[in-house]
Every structure is written in structure tokens, then in C-alpha cells.
Amino acid sequence: MAGEPCIVVQDLWYSYGGEVTALQGIDLEIEDGDYVAVIGQNGSGKTTLVKHFNGLLKPTRGRVLVRGLSDREGSPLLRDTADLTAGQLAQTVGYVFQNPDHQIFCATTRQELAFGPRNLDLPEAEVKRRVEEALARFDLEEVADKPPAVLGYGLRRKIGVAAVYAMRPRIFILDEPTTGLDWRSTMELMELIGEMHCHGHTIILVTHDMKLVAEFSQKSLVLRDGQVLVYDDTRNVFEHSEILRDTQIEPPQITALAKRMVPYGMPGDVLSVEEFYTAYCGLGER
Amino acid sequence: MTLEISIRDLHFSYPVLSGVEGPPLASDGEPIPVLKGIDLEVERGEFVSIMGPTGVGKTTLCLALNGIVPQSTGGTIRGEVVVAGLNTRQHPVPKLASQVGIVFQDPESQFFNMAVEDEVAFGPESLGLDPREIRERVDWALKAVGMNPHRHRSPFQLSGGEKQRVAIASILAMTPRILVLDEPTSGLDPIGKAEVFRVVRELKKREQMTIVMVEQESEKIAEFSDRVVILRDGKIALLDTPDRVFAQVELMHEIGLAVPQVSELAYLFNTRHNTSYTFTCLEDAYQALVSRITVYESRITVHESEVAYGR
Amino acid sequence: MSFSFDLYVQRRSWLHAVDPRVKLAFVFLGTVLMLAFKNLFIMLLSLAITHLIISSAGVPGHKVRWVWKTMLPINIMIPLLWVIFYPEGPTVLFQFWFLKVTALSFLRGIALALRLDAIAFICFTWLFTTDQTSLVRSLVKLGLPFEWGLVLAIGLRYIPTFYGLYTVVSEAQQARALDLTRGSFFTRVRSYLPILVAMLISALRTSEQLARAMESRALGLPGVQRTCLRDIRFRPADYAYTALLIALFSALLTLRFQFGLGTHPLYLF
């Protein structure tokens, strides 16, 4: 239900092996249907944080609540991840890992896509239906009977995402899904993710690519040293891009150009080339 | 000017591995070639970047420069590759490697010793150099990449960007005439990318070093390159200076590649307003666009007269 | 997040400065000695000596504790098994049904467990104070072909990386609802298959990239003898240590086989 929280983080602290404190008191609410970009340097706690959402990590202190699938009396409940295993949460929270080769092991693409749904104990007919749908949606029909491991990187990447998609989780976490992809494959993948978003899935995109953040995300969560630096609409975050600079992240070239031209009347929150063009042409009319 | 790299009509296909699903086969059972006729000449001191869709053969082309293709990979090759005066089919790979250093994409699989210093010394040790000279080279290479304070650290203590810089130092220590960087920043975070590009910027200043860099970041390519090679379907589709290559926005998008955002902006202006802008960097765009604006008190006017900003 | 699994403790100590070949000799001779003796006091003495040596080399306490923690299952199992399967001697401590716990078999079991501990700590005096490069160099100087030494070195270097790989792959598969805890023993073993296969494929890819990286560092340049930045050389002290080791070794072996020192778990002679 849009507007309702689907992930709630309450005073989350996490230490690896009791020594390194990766997260320091994070408070956060992500709503159903949001498209959130998670930004930060390696070591800022991004991956540590999102691994709490699907139960791979449990809080050292604090709580993480995730809205479950069960639609018994009324709307689904927010459940504490500490009570559930990663396997149980996989039904609600899908996690696409950065390196598709960490997931791929099957002899055919079909089997690979079927793995997740089968683990969810779905009836075989349903598994088959979902596999065929994922193959069609991700344009993988041609390679359906080939072993994923010998396919090119771009295809393996798509298969990794499709395999999680076949599980129909409410929430999708994608950890740097466009690393190593060329521009076209990146755009194709981002469009597929955008479609999933349109169909009501909540998207959490961990990425270093500021252009993608600017173009696709609604909200941006910036982490530094295990703390939330800012969590706001992407537009606002880019408007105050000193925040990004603070954590040594550069805004996209076009945003930087617009910012330099703010004294001339350009808005400070230009997110795309088209926006810049429109804003520049509208300058004389003020 | 001396020719450091000379590639003539290079064709290459990977070998068919019997019993294993290997590279795609054509209808007659022959493997489909990856490189289908590459001609390229690079002069000493040039900085050439290579862009292309994933899987087009960029890494294969890099490996052809130090002989790993075809000597270690096998496969069918036609044409000629001459680097630093050596034909890559007539000299053993280690000898070519001493002239052509390649830094690969994955920092983890390029750091196989337990200490930074040992890693950087490995190449010179393979070359059989005197320990005193090895020490000098290791010191110099570590300073060149800014990793000197970390010389006793192990790979587990380093970030991705640091590991890549050590990889670059390990190659520099062999003093190759040609440095090849195959998507060196691909898996790195913004700080790591910045660190590696900083080193690349420094290396570019050394006139004796010829650099070939494969990258996806068009903005960095625009910053560093003397010329840009665009690969498509195993062949060179474009070979020109960055501003000319990135001005062809439609063609680049058709091939499936990005151009710097300011180049896209120039393209928008050019198609809609009949201007002839060429922006390859932020500064170009800023100067050109600002020059059309006057701020008089609080009124801003954008001049209709074009300012053709050419190069 | 980097996972640091490094046996080597980076310090400057007298033991670190000892030539790795001497330490290797210590390991070899020490192990032979430990296998020759069966007396638990001798085992305890050797443990005390190795602990002294290790701490004088600046190795932190938690590493020593880690070794004991790792040895714990062995230290429990061996006396237990010995007592169950090899009852001997007159003094019976405890009898329950068919289980007869005698003093002698209990002492033998303990002596045996302590012997393994002693050998372990002898090995660790070597591993804690010798870095990978020197270790491999010492083996190469003793006759191991360089390529084998390189294989050994790379193997050691990648152990933590593959452990990390296991963790990542395991998480990736659990994120696809793979349940490792459910079902019978066989079901559970089978559920590790996705993890192992994915790991194997990743490992194969990494090794291909590694091979290219090594080739690109001119490995195997024909007609050229490899040199070494940090070579190892015998100092006068190393000759002295070697002489001392040989002397002690011969003396102790003579005491053992000529005079029967340490053949009984409790009594020295």
C-alpha cells in the first residue's frame, strides 16, 4: 500500500566480529513503492545496511522491521527480521548480488530461474509459469536452454536479476547491478527495473553511478561512516550537492554544469541533459 | 614519430573446446571471429582509449598486444601485431610482457603476493634484474602511484583502489614502453576510481610512455585521450579525436555507447538551434553557454546570436 | 570488508630474524622428537618451551589462544577415545557397564593429546614468525622448484579470499531462499551444492585471470634466471642455532633409545 512503510529501521547498530562498528544508530523508514538509491563510499555501511533488510545480517543493537507477504486479517504486518531467517525473508525481499557469478550454478538458464521459486515451495506449474514470464520479460528466451556460466557477462547479469524477479519479492535490493555493463545494457537493465517499480515493487538500488541515481531514483540515501548523511528526494540531495562532495562523491557532469551556472539563473537541481536544455532555454523568460 | 603499436588486418577467433560449450559457432561449425580486421597505429607517447559494447573484443585486443593472444589462448589468428618493434607471434609472451604491461580489471586476481613490496618486485624479479636495481624500481614505482607508505601491507588490508594502484606499480616496475589498462576502474568505488585516474593523469605526463586505456566512462576518456577507438562487431567503427568521436551522438547511441553529458547537450543545441557546438568537457560547455548570457542588474538575457565554439 | 586470516605476525624479533630454514629444521626435528617420546611431562615441558619462544617473539596472546581453541576438539576426543578403546593397567578409576576407565589409559590418552598440541605449537613457532615470501624462498633454496613454491605461495594467499567467496556465495544463494538448515542430513548436504558449484565456477574464472596477470609480469622469461629482492642468508647466529638443534636432537634421541627416557606416560624412566 503506497505511503505505508515497508522497511523500518530503528536505532540500528552493527559491529562485525564485535570490533569494527559498521553502522552507528541508523533510523530510517522506506515506504511501499519507493525507489531509493543508496549512495556512499565502500566502507560507508551501504552493503551492511541493506543486508539487514533481507535478514542476512541481524542487528547488534536496534531493530529492523520488514513488511511481510502474509495478507491475513487486513494489511500485512511489519515483522522483525531478527525472528526470521534470510531464507524466509527471501519471499518478501529479493537481493541481487553485485557479481552474478556468485549466484549462477545451474546447467540451463531455465533451471537457474526456477531455483528461487522452487525454494519457495511453489507448485511446479506456478514455477514453470514464472520462469517463462521471466524469460520473456528479460528477453532471455534465446538462451533458455544454455548454461548461464558460458554466456557473456551482460547476459549473466540479466539472468541474475531475472532469477530474483522470478521470486516476485515485494522489495528488490540491487547491489551495483550495472558494474561492468556498457551503456546500452545499463539502460536496458534500468528500464526493466523501472518497469518493476511501475508494477508496485519497492526498489532499493545501491550504486556508485550518479547519473543513474539522478535519472531513475525518487529518493536518495547517502551514508558515510556508518551513519545517514541525508535521506531525501533525489532532487533535493542533488540540489545540495555539497553533501555529496562531503563524502567525495561527484554529481553528474550536467548537474555540476548547472550548479556553476546558478548565478545566471539556472536551477540547482538539474538531473538530466534534457532538463538542462529546457532550463537554459527558459532563462530569458524570467 | 616512432610507431609503438602497429596492428595490421588483425583477425582472431578463440579456439573451439571439444566437448565443452565454447564460443559461438557459425553454421559451418567454425568459431565466430572476435576480431574481424583491426588496423591501428599508435605512436610513442600517445594516449589512445578504446570503447565498445560488452563482449565486443576489447580485452581480446589488449591481450593481443602482449602476445597472450594467440600464444596462451590458442585460437586462429590472421594479420600482424608489432609492439615496440617486436612481432607478437615471434617472441615469447614474457619478453613481450616486459615491453607491454597490462593492468586488468579485477584487483583481487592481480595481487598474488602477501605484501605490497613483494608484489611490485615480482615483475623485475622475473626479468632477472640485480636486487639493487629491483629495489630502486620498486621505490620509484610505489612513489609514482602513491603507495609508498603502504609497502609492507598485505592485500587483505587494502581497498580496491589501493590494490589497483599496486597493480599499476607492479607493471611500472618493469618499465614497459607501452601501458595497457583494461577497464581499470570497473569495480571500484568513487574514491578508488579517482585514485586510479589520478595516477593515470600523472603517467600521461611522462612523454615516453604510450598508454592504451579501455574504459566505459566517456567523460574520463574525453579528458585523457589523444584519440578514441570505437569497436563494433569486432571492427573499428570510429577512430578519431575525442571531440569528433563524441560529437557523433546518434552513431554512438546506435552502437550502444554513452557520450559525455555535455556532448549530448551540444548535440541537443545543434539539432534544435542549428548551432555547431562541440563540448567535450564541462569547461567548454560552461564557457560557451555563459558567453551567450548577459546579466544586467537582475535581468538575464540569452543572446540569440550563435556563438560557434569550434576547436 | 576484508577478512584478515594471516598466521604471520609482523614483528621484529630474534625469532623473526632467524633463517626460515633453521626454523623448518626445528619443526622437522622437533616433530620427530615429539613422536619418539610418550611421557606427558616431556610434552608439557616442550609446550612450555614453545610458548616461551613464541611470546618472546612478540606474538600476541589471542593468536596463542586461537591455536588452543582450534585444538580443543582433539584434546577432548583423543583421551576419550583412548580411554574407551584401550583400557590397560591395574588401577581402575571408574567402571560403568562395559566401560572400564583405567588410570594408565587415561594418562596415555592425555599424553597423546598433548603430543599433538606440542607438535602444533612447534609448527606455529615457524608459521607465526615467517612471512610467506621467506617461507617459499627457503623451500626453493632447499631444492623445491620455483613454480611449486609459487603455487604454494598463491595457495596460501588465496585461502582467505576463498573463505570470503564462500561467505558471499552462501549469502547470495540464501537470498534466493536456499535453506541450509532444513531436512535430513542428505538434504542438507545437497543444499550446499549451489554454493559449491558457484564457488567453483568463480574460482575457475579467478584462476584464469590470475594466470594472465602472472604472464603479464613476465613469469617464465626464457634464458633468464629469476632474482630475488629479499633473499635469505645464513648469519653466524643461524649456524649456531643449527648446531644447537642437532646437538640437542642427538642427545635427546640417545637418552630415549639408549636409556629409555620418556617411554612411560607418567614416569620419566
Image: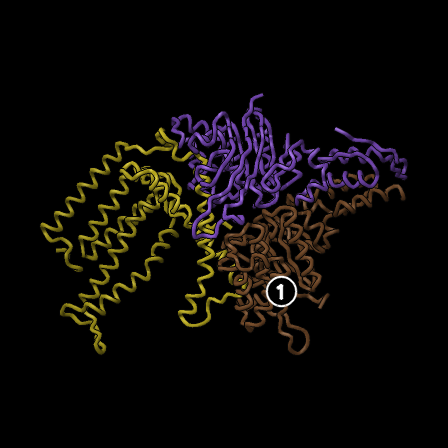
Chain colours: A brown, B purple, C yellow
- Residue at 28 percent of width and 49 percent of height: C122
Q: Looking at the rendering, in which quadrant would you find the C terminus of chain A?
A: top right
| Residue furthest top in the image | B1
Label 1 Cα neighbours within 10 Å, binned few <14 / some 14-19 / many ≥20: some
Question: In the depicted view, which residue is nearer to us: A131 or C48?
Answer: A131
Secondary structure of the residue carrying tag 1 is helix
Q: How many callouts does the rendering have?
A: 1
User: What's the amino acid at mark 1?
Assistant: Glu
- Residue at 63 percent of width and 63 percent of height: A171
Q: Is residue A5 visible?
A: yes
Q: Percent from the top left, x then y, of residue A192? A: 66, 57
Question: In the depicted view, which residue is nearer to us: C229 or A133?
Answer: A133
Q: Looking at the rendering, in which quadrant would you find the N terminus of chain A?
A: bottom right
Please tell me whether residue C139 is drawn above or below residue A165 in the rendered image. Answer: above
Please tell me whether residue B99 is drawn above or below residue C91 in the rendered image. Answer: above
Judge left or right: residue C246 versus residue C52. left
Quickly name the residue at label 1: A133
Please tell me whether residue B106 is drawn above or below residue B238 in the rendered image. Answer: below
Q: Percent from the top left, x then y, of residue C43? A: 23, 54
Q: Percent from the top left, x then y, of residue C250? A: 15, 44
- Residue at 49 percent of width and 67 percent of height: C179
Q: State the image quarter where residue B181 is shown.
A: top right
